[in-house]
Amino acid sequence: MKDPVDVLIIGAGASGAAVAWSLAETKMHILCLEQGGWMNPAEYPSAGRDWEAKFYGEWSSSPNVRGRPEDYPVNDDNSPIKVVNYNAVGGSTVMYTAHWPRLHPSDFKVKTLDGVADDWPIDYDALTPFFEENDRIMGTSGLSGDPLSPLTHPPMPQQPMGLSGAIIGKAMNKLGWHWWPSDTTVATMDYEGRARCINLGHCTPACAQGAKSSTDITYWPQAIRAGVELRTHCRVREITTDENGMASGVVYYDKDGVEQFQPAHVVIIACNGVGTPRLLLNSASSRFPNGLANSSGLVGKNLMFHPYAQIYGYVKEPTDSNRAPPTCLWSKQWYDTDLARGFVRGFGVQFVRGAGPVFEAVVSEQKDILPWGEDHHRVFRKLNGHRLGFSAICEDLPEEHNRVTLDPGLKDSHGIPAPKISYTISENSQKMMDYALARGREILETAGATDICVNSPIPWGGWHLLGTARMGTDPERSVVNEWGRTHDVKNLFIVDGSIFVTSGGVNPTSTIQALALYIADQMKQRLANLFD
Amino acid sequence: MSADNQLTRTQRGDLRIIAAMIVPASDEYKVPGADDAAIQADMLATLGRDTKLVAAALDHLARLAGAPLAELDAARREAVAQEFRKSGGAAAATLARVVLQCYYRDDRVLRSLGIELRPPFPKGHVLPDGDWSLLDPVKARGGSMRQIP
Ligand SMILES: Cc1cc2nc3c(=O)[nH]c(=O)nc-3n(C[C@H](O)[C@H](O)[C@H](O)COP(=O)(O)OP(=O)(O)OC[C@H]3O[C@@H](n4cnc5c(N)ncnc54)[C@H](O)[C@@H]3O)c2cc1C
Ligand code: SF4
């Protein structure tokens, strides 16, 4: 039998990397098991002439399309929004778009402010030092001082405005609406061993330049230098428990497919809002028949995606198309509740600079704005390099029927039951999306755009996986307590997006990592009585 | 077996013709059609994981046409193509995508669009920094985040 480790982390993505790095200073024996491997930037799509085509195959953001052995399938037939992720050292940060807003202080108090969902058991202030620490290590760029966003101190200047940014800024000024350069994790200068962004424009399916911060090139090298052990190609099947109802370790399949047992004194789950409930449900036993840490029955429930309402059009002037990181500006004009709009809560906006030629052709053909036949060339030249986009990140409220369960038939390559998603867009979210599209249309028309197209929701937009093991003080209404420990199993912690109580109207990863660092800090402060 | 051999001769013939219907050659823009030999060769060589759906799309097309596309007159071919677009589902969408992704990486086509013939990495692109005084009205308006009691 293997020697027990002090701390076993499952998942080496955004949150797993942050918690590993933070705990490393304790000098405990920390082991992370990750089902994927290390990435090789030399193989990233933007280094080849077929860079755009790869996004439709081996570099798709959908695990079902990619189908790498490191991926697990997800049955999302019962959801208008499909799950996208990445499974490797770095997790979904390998594939993310690096847009970096934080939840607002008001997002932690939605019950108090708006009478919906629940307040978080912690507030924004508790996370402030960890947001700052995380921004330093991930390496953010941006412009401090946005009046409608939490104060940040990005260590690097904002991305260039580019052609697209200027068109959007002018339109927003005409309308008198708020906009600001986005905080992003794109390095705009050489930073801590990372080369600055050279505008490959292909940030989402991985940055060959290393300018986009994914945790395989930020947290992990530091954590490993500090003594953390990372074992790749190790897929955890289940967490085991002992006669005292404590986690005793995990059963996993190693890189050769051989079943192994790894004992541990503390287990931390960082598998994301779909992978984590899947693992807890797969860890059902006679002691925990409904799944591990699931006495509340809430494991897998309250899945929140952030339905994206996207609208785009084409202006006469050239835009940046694929010659820049896709995101550059945000707006918080509609972030806070205004009941006169017909819905509660609100949305952040992420403006999109444009698209590359293949993507433009494929999508426009599907949207029927790019004809077949003789007129194809004229229309393509009108569209290509002229696109501008607006995406509203709509706050999804927690609803128990939106959930992750285990699929009765579908399994991954190790025979482990796969997750099944059941999700519908609520009436409130739908009204918010419709409202957002109307505002987006006004902006695009003010910018002079025509051929306006809508994706609402973005179907392959299940990138924010939140709420399926929520945080709270009441064990009957939550899965983990206010410092990330499961109510039911006193040496089992969760640090990923599944612990979100509500989703806010912004991309979540900055907040996910700040939470992971906060939980690590709480653990360090309580080491002497962690299991009390 | 190479992807080349995974489509039958008739399927390859139909692919060539439907590709030209999607993107015909143009003297005005000085570009080949998507039935160009080099572009077709690229498609066949890189079909890979799309082979099954493309083959299914071509089978559907053959059913609609009732004969190799080459044997139909222009009007009938056009009608079949319309129907194919309408009823072809995911398979037809995959076929169109395969045609377009190979077409829009061809040197002659990119040159005509004024796009450099290279992958994005390692040269990258240059982006104008822009005039940040555009932000002045936003700064002047100010405002604040929602307060919590
Ligand atoms: C296309 C795309 C664009 C995005 N854009 C943005 C953006 O612009 N801004 C933003 O804030 N967020 C964005 N996101 C979301 C962001 O990537 C996630 O919020 C973040 O990575 C979640 O962190 P996590 O730690 O919860 O999970 P992940 O980063 O997904 O990491 C989970 C890890 O756990 C591993 N794992 C899972 N199950 C097991 C198991 N049983 N055994 C072993 N290992 C396991 C996985 O392989 C994975 O590496 C985007 C995501 C995608 C896919
Ligand atoms: S645009 Fe910048 S961050 Fe994005 S892939 Fe290119 S170099 Fe990387």
Image (tube, coloured by chain):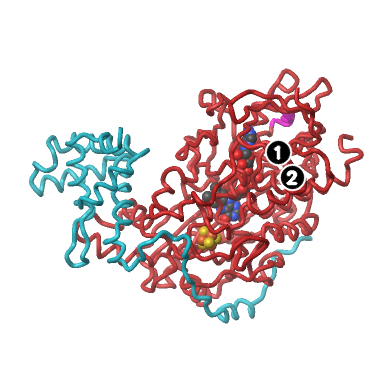
- Furthest toward the right, the residue is A528
Residue range in magenta is A290-297
Residue under mark 2: which chain is it in? A
For label 2, count other residues whose C-alpha is less than 10 Å away and answer few (under 14), some (14-19) or many (20+): many
Residue under mark 1: which chain is it in? A
Say what amino acid the circle numbered 1 marks.
Cys
Say what amino acid the circle numbered 2 marks.
Ala
Q: Label 1 vs label 2: CA separation? A: 8 Å
Kindly identify which residue carries mark 1. Answer: A32
- Observer-nearest of A516 and B3: B3
Is disc 2 placed on a helix, strand or loop? helix
Quarter of the rendering occupied by the C terminus of chain A: top right
Looking at the colours in the rendered structure, which chain would you say is drawn in cyan? Answer: B
At 65% across and 63% down in the image, what residue appears?
A140
Which tag, 1 or 2, sits closer to the chain's start?
Answer: 2
Ligand 1 contact, mark 2 (Cβ < 8 Å): no
- Observer-nearest of A12 and A243: A12
Looking at the colours in the rendered structure, which chain would you say is drawn in red? Answer: A
